[in-house]
Image (spheres, grey):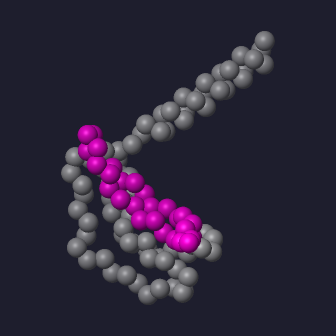
Amino acid sequence: MKKSLTRFLFLMAVLFTASFSASSQIYVKIRPPRPPVVVRPPQPSRVHVWVDEDWQRYGNSYRYSGGHWSNPPHRGYNWIPGHWQRSRYGERWVPGHWGQQRRRH
């Protein structure tokens, strides 16, 4: 009985934590301005890819964290840029991520 109660409480804690983190999206009514000029430093190597736009959560808003060079995690991966997504709550930043290139037949 004690094991069952412990398992149940653990499962409830995990589910509660997962639901809390999934709902912690930040929406803004007005998108923060992007800096007018972004200086791109020299490419560190031929395999590095420029990640152009990136925004980090900052309190109840977003802060531009600038572009940067990044090394793909695996061969054949490309950078899928982040974007602003509009909804009835406002706009939120959907971060970019690495993805595999699809082959065309």
Residue beneath the point at 49% across and 62% down? 97
Whether 97 is drawn above or below 104: the answer is above
Residue 6: image location, x then y, percent: 72, 21
Q: Name the foreground residue: 47 vs 65.
A: 47
The image quarter in which residue 52 lies:
bottom left
Residue 85: image location, x then y, percent: 32, 51
Direction front: furthest residue: 105
Instruction: State which quarter of the image contains the C terminus.
Output: bottom right
Q: Magenta segment, principal secondary structure?
A: strand
Direction top: furthest residue: 1
Instruction: State which quarter of the image contains the N terminus.
Output: top right
Is residue 60 visible to us here?
no
Residue 99: image location, x then y, percent: 54, 64
Does the stretch in magenta take in 82? yes
Does the stretch in magenta take in 78? yes
Residue beneath the point at 35% across and 44% down? 26
Q: Name the foreground residue: 62 vs 97.
A: 97
Q: Name the foreground residue: 35 vs 22.
A: 22
Tell me the magenta residue range: 77-105
**In this rendering, would 66 be left or right of 20?**
left
Residue beneath the point at 37% across and 82% down? 40
**In this rendering, would 8 be left or right of 93?**
right
Residue 19: image location, x then y, percent: 50, 33
Whether 97 is drawn above or below 26: the answer is below
Is residue 99 visible to us here?
yes
Whether 22 is drawn above or below 69: the answer is above
Whether 71 is drawn above or below 60: the answer is below
